């Protein structure tokens, strides 16, 4: 299967003859992903540090490296809406998210109608849902904050919550983000920072501060494992 074929179709634009195979592939793989998340959640020791108030929604932000660990903590999402990569081969993640109770899935990413998706998400977040961003994703460079999360926070008037989700033991992949795959019977530390509301006139400074907080939180969470 070529990269060209992988990138040719969005999940909402596949030809009719590919719709049923995509559904079969998506539901089988999606349920496997969900069962893996259940295994990690049920066998892990999870420690929250500085957990925010439950009555406030946020635009959560953490590095792309930690996305699988974060998702494995969400057996049931509560008042959450998510961006999902729109290409067809990512459909299993949409299935897993639906099974986990996500309210809304917004199709979009950098280079795939991301601006339109961010506008839709800002309206959803303004209405009361939370969402999350990996500000260096989906393609990097690592450790560099793109400003999509800041724009959604400003448009929705909902603060950004910097955080880190660090697990051990885990498998670290060799891709651009060194993505971590959590293993069963591990320890996961979820650490929250100081919520902030970006300001249009200082977006560059706000992006740098968000990166600084996420770096510091990742380092601090990692120290819990030492």
Image (cartoon, rainbow, N blue to C red):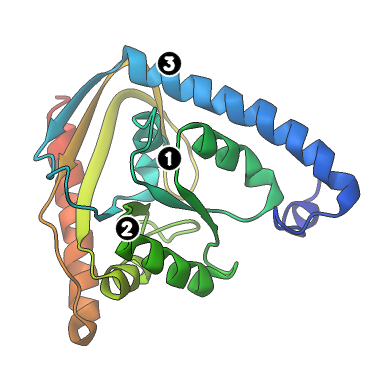
Foreground: 108 or 171? 108
- The location of residue 96, given as percent across then percent down, is 54, 34
> Above or below — where is 141 with respect to 79?
below
Secondary structure under tag 2 reads loop
Camera-nearest label, 2 or 3: 3
- The location of residue 39, given as percent across then percent down, is 43, 16
Label 3 Cα neighbours within 10 Å, binned few <14 / some 14-19 / many ≥20: some
- The location of residue 148, given as percent across then percent down, is 38, 69
Position of the C terminus, as image quadrant, is: top left
Q: Which mark is residue 143?
A: 2
- What residue do we see at 82% from left, 37% from top? 21
The answer to whether any part of residue 209 appears in the image is: yes
State the separation of the CA atoms marked 2 and 1: 13 Å
Q: Which mark is residue 39?
A: 3
- The location of residue 108, given as percent across then percent down, is 55, 62
- What residue do we see at 68% from left, 26% from top? 28
Of pointers 3 and 1, the one earlier in the residue sequence? 3
Q: For mark 1, what is the residue?
A: 179
Secondary structure under tag 1 reads loop
Of pointers 2 and 1, the one earlier in the residue sequence? 2
- What residue do we see at 42% from left, 48% from top? 177
């Amino acid at each position: 299967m070529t990269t060209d074929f992988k990138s040719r179709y969005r999940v909402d634009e596949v030809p009719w003859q590919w719709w049923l195979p995509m559904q079969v592939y998506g539901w089988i793989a999606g349920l496997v992903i969900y069962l893996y998340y259940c295994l990690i959640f049920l066998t892990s020791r999870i420690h929250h540090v500085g957990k925010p108030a439950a009555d406030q929604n946020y635009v959560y932000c953490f590095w792309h490296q930690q996305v699988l660990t974060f998702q494995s903590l969400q057996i049931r999402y509560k008042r959450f809406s998510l961006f999902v990569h729109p290409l067809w081969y990512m459909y299993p993640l949409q299935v897993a998210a639906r099974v986990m109770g996500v309210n809304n899935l917004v199709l979009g990413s950098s280079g795939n109608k991301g601006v339109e998706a961010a506008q839709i998400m800002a309206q959803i977040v303004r209405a009361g849902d939370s969402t999350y961003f990996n500000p260096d994703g989906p393609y990097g460079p690592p450790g560099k904050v793109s400003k999509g999360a800041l724009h959604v926070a400003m448009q929705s008037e909902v603060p950004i919550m910097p955080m880190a989700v660090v697990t051990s033991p885990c498998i670290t992949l060799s891709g651009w983000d060194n993505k971590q795959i959590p293993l069963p019977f591990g320890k996961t530390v979820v650490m929250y920072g100081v919520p902030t509301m970006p300001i249009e006139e200082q977006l560059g400074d706000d992006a740098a501060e968000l990166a600084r907080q996420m770096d510091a939180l990742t380092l601090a969470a990692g120290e819990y494992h030492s």
